[in-house]
Image (cartoon, rainbow, N blue to C red):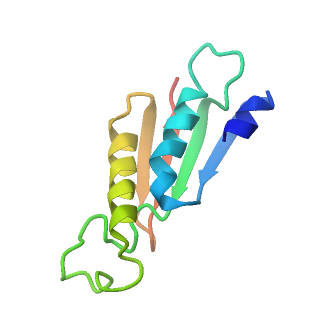
Amino acid sequence: IKTLHARGLPPFALVVVDADKTSYITYLELILSFSEPGSTNCLLRPGGVIIADNILRRGLVADHSQANPYNNTNTNRGKDREVIDEINKKMKSDKRLDDLLLPVFDGLGMARLVD
């Protein structure tokens, strides 16, 4: 993200985050900080969309109890779940974002940069 921003490219209309889950919140914060209103070198244009993949982690973010059949599988990585829960909350609460969560398989989080 830092490399793309440093290149001074025109702002992107779409940014997809599908990488190291424990860094999702860092990626979101970088995207937002490099997309400040009025900046001459924005990463994401106003109205641009951020997509974050695997935002529900097989439902473990919403339900990490023993009732979830995936709780005892390889997908239940505690730190991943915590960070993904954090990014969900950040996307929901950030006034610069208009968010949507699609509950398909591992979940797809989408947010539009409103400024």
Residue located farthest toward the left when viewing the structure as drawn: 66
* Residue 109 visible to an observer of this rendering: no
Image spot of residue 47 (x, y percent):
59, 31
* Residue 95 visible to an observer of this rendering: yes
Q: In this view, does 27 lie to the left or right of 2?
A: left
Displayed quadrant of residue 13:
top right
Displayed quadrant of residue 78:
bottom left
Image spot of residue 84 (x, y percent):
39, 57
- The answer to which of 73 and 103 lies nearer the viewer is 73
Residue at 44% from the left image edge and 65% from the top image edge: 107
Image spot of residue 79 (x, y percent):
36, 63
Figure check: 23 above or below 14: below
Assign the N terminus to one quadrant of the image. top right
Residue at 54% from the left image edge and 60% from the top image edge: 20
Figure check: 4 above or below 86: above
Residue at 25% from the left image edge and 81% from the top image edge: 68
Displayed quadrant of residue 27:
top right
Figure check: 50 above or below 85: above
Residue located farthest toward the top when viewing the structure as drawn: 38
Q: In this view, does 39 lie to the left or right of 53?
A: right
Residue at 40% from the left image edge and 42% from the top image edge: 91
What is the count of numbered marks? 0
- The answer to which of 111 and 78 lies nearer the viewer is 78
